[in-house]
Image (cartoon, rainbow, N blue to C red):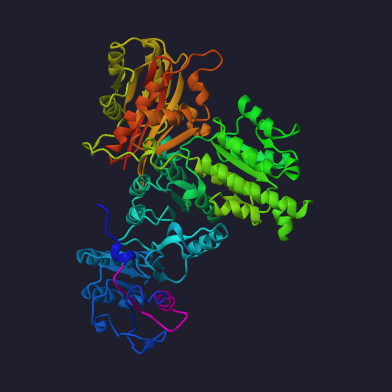
Amino acid sequence: MARDLTALFDPASVAVVGASDDPAKYGHAVASQALRAPGRRPVHLVNRRGGTVLGRTAATSLSAIGEPVELVVISVPGAGFEDAVDDALACGAKAIVAITAGFAEAGPAGLARQRAVADRVRAAGAVLVGPNCLGIADNTTELYLASDRFAPGGVALLSQSGNLALELQLRGEPYGLGFSRFVSLGNQADVTLVDLVEDCARHRATSAIAVYAEDFGDGRAFAAAAAAAGKPVVLLTAGRGSASARSAQSHTGALTTSADVVAAACRDAGVELVRTPREMTVVLTALATPAAGPRTAGRRRTAVFTDGGGHGAVAADAAEDAGLDVPELDAATQDRLRRVLWEQSSVGNPVDLAGMGEQRPLSYADTVGELLAAEGVDAVLMTGYFGGYAASEGGLGGGAAGGSVLAEGETRAAKEIVAHLAAVPKPLVVQSMYPRSASCRVLAEAGVPVFAATEDAARALAAMTGRAVSDPGGAVPPLPPAAAPLRDPGYHAVRALLADAGVPFPAAREVADEAGLLAAAAEFEGPYVLKALHVLHKSDAGGVALRLADRDALLAAYRAMHGRLGAPAYSVEAMADLTDGVELIVGVNRDPRFGPVAMVGLGGVLTETLRDVAFALAPVPAGRAAGLLRSLRGAALLDGVRGRPALDVAAAAAVVERVTAVAAAHPEIAELEVNPLLVRPDGALALDARAVLD
């Protein structure tokens, strides 16, 4: 159940324990901020020496206040922290913000102290943010308990870094980006990132949730909370590029990195994953303002509109790099554009005024209006000189001739663009050489994102045209109930586990000697396959022999392989028909934060060489699996190339669903893999499987 954080964000009263007149102490900064709104609620300052702090009488202890306090900020040396927590709970505190550091981040002893404190807080029915945090703020309730001020707005900022939060505040200011709330996550001993995302999702004044996190805690629960938020969630995280620390024993484990896992979770949850504070600011500017235009749920046909060929070409490349489509406009749209533009204008896409803007500034608005109205256009990226005419008059560096006449016309054009957008709401983003000009300010004040950099405009538009946050097709899949544990990770036991789940395999028998080999060969016709068991990466070790035509060939291969490898057991299998087939890989790697993560890709012995793979949180429904397969670079092979027939993608997707469901139901399995999965025009067949127990 979602936790009630009312006492944290809108308490009836506040006390700052460790308040100080010393500017070098954090208790000074927090106390100064807390006193910004003394009329909203009682604010008590506590300093064990008493006297005055910031011109107010300070209580020597919480109990000396003489009345209950609902929220207590604790900023005292570590040795006195537990006593301060006990005093807060004794005084009826329902929420504690712990600035004090020196707990889990300091080692095992600190972690034990942290857990003990969190247990006491929860037992008292209270909530704790931190320890080792930098405070909280809520502009909607005039709660200021952090060292910095945050401009009011619609973004809830949940961050493990105070400096990054400050940078986002500074970067957002030119775009009018403000914050409804700020929470420094700290060690998340009690109140977690998941709790805060869920609460911010319910917070009416919050239009978007920005997260900087290095430790997700329960990453899968974070993804589920973000998917259910019903409003944009933008994530900046660190350490995404490092490989898993566990020594992988399968291709899946070797190929799955932290970056893949986080990206898959974000994709499934509809979270906008960004790489830098600048990119986060760009995406928030596009998504946090309700007037910025609707999200178009994956419809990304983009018209690039410019007043100069160079800007148009660069913007078209940037749009495609950001994942947008820039198709040629249909004939009807081109005809309508020709009626409002002059002869030398280009109307294919990019659409280029070719100098008409200097003759008639309203041509900007006319063109935007036609593009917004076009059925084949989902979004518009306007780029180039727009804003320069008004900038020339305003002394911002514009150089166009015509002065105030062009400036006035450009401002009128901006107002008409806003009117067109109100009549036909579609994502519209502007890149301008003069983003601070009067005409660009008209657009920005109406909710149209305006950027100086082309790549920023393209990224913002990609965010606005991304998957809708309520789209169930990408929801985080729930984990199934745990099945009876797999005790034997041997090859045939794993085959049996998967076969019971409906994964098809060729006939096979496990043998330990020549007599068993010949008995197995008598049970089904050749050609045969011989595999050495209990050998890691059998193909690399020469432990697989294919296309053994008859029993004599099988026996000869066995003698040669056994003499070379001396394996304790072997598998005799029916050779599958490889004609017109493609080998895939299906695997699941269990991540310590996000749980089972599925990987699909081109398989066989070249899996790690090709690295053509895609990831998703497991289990993966068949429909989602088909989408992953279609996203591969080599997806054209599935539809048949050079006269070959199309493959049964539905059968392959069904196997992906079954394999990932098995892995998700077996938490004791660290890695589960089918490689190769042979996909033919008439179905799919698993040719090899392995499991690694945790």
Q: Does the magenta stretch include residue 28?
A: yes
Q: In the current view of this chain or complex, which residue is farthest to the right?
A: 401
Q: In the current view of this chain or complex, which residue is farthest to the bottom?
A: 51
Q: Nearer the viewer, residue 95 or 514?
A: 95
Residue at the image point whose x is 61% and y is 35% from the top: 370
Q: How many labels does the image show?
A: 0
Q: Which of 173 and 645 is in front in this view?
A: 173
Q: Where is residue 19 drawn, in percent x and y?
A: 38, 80
Q: Can residue 39 be seen in this view?
A: yes
Residue at the image point whose x is 51% and y is 60% from the top: 168
207 shown above or below 636: below
Q: Where is residue 296 drawn, in percent x and y?
A: 48, 38
Query: Where the C terminus falls, by quadrant?
Result: top left
Q: Where is residue 136 drawn, in percent x and y?
A: 39, 66
- Quarter of the image for residue 93 reads bottom left
Q: Where is residue 380 drawn, in percent x and y?
A: 58, 39
19 shown above or below 366: below
14 shown above or below 578: below
Q: What stretch is highlighted in magenta?
A: 11-34
Q: Nearer the viewer, residue 120 or 453?
A: 453
Q: Can residue 538 be seen in this view?
A: no
Residue 393 falls left or right of residue 565: right
Q: Is residue 305 magenta?
A: no
Residue 451 falls left or right of residue 214: right
Q: Which of 463 and 632 is in front in this view?
A: 463
Residue at the image point whose x is 38% and y is 35% from the top: 473
- Quarter of the image for residue 124 reads bottom left
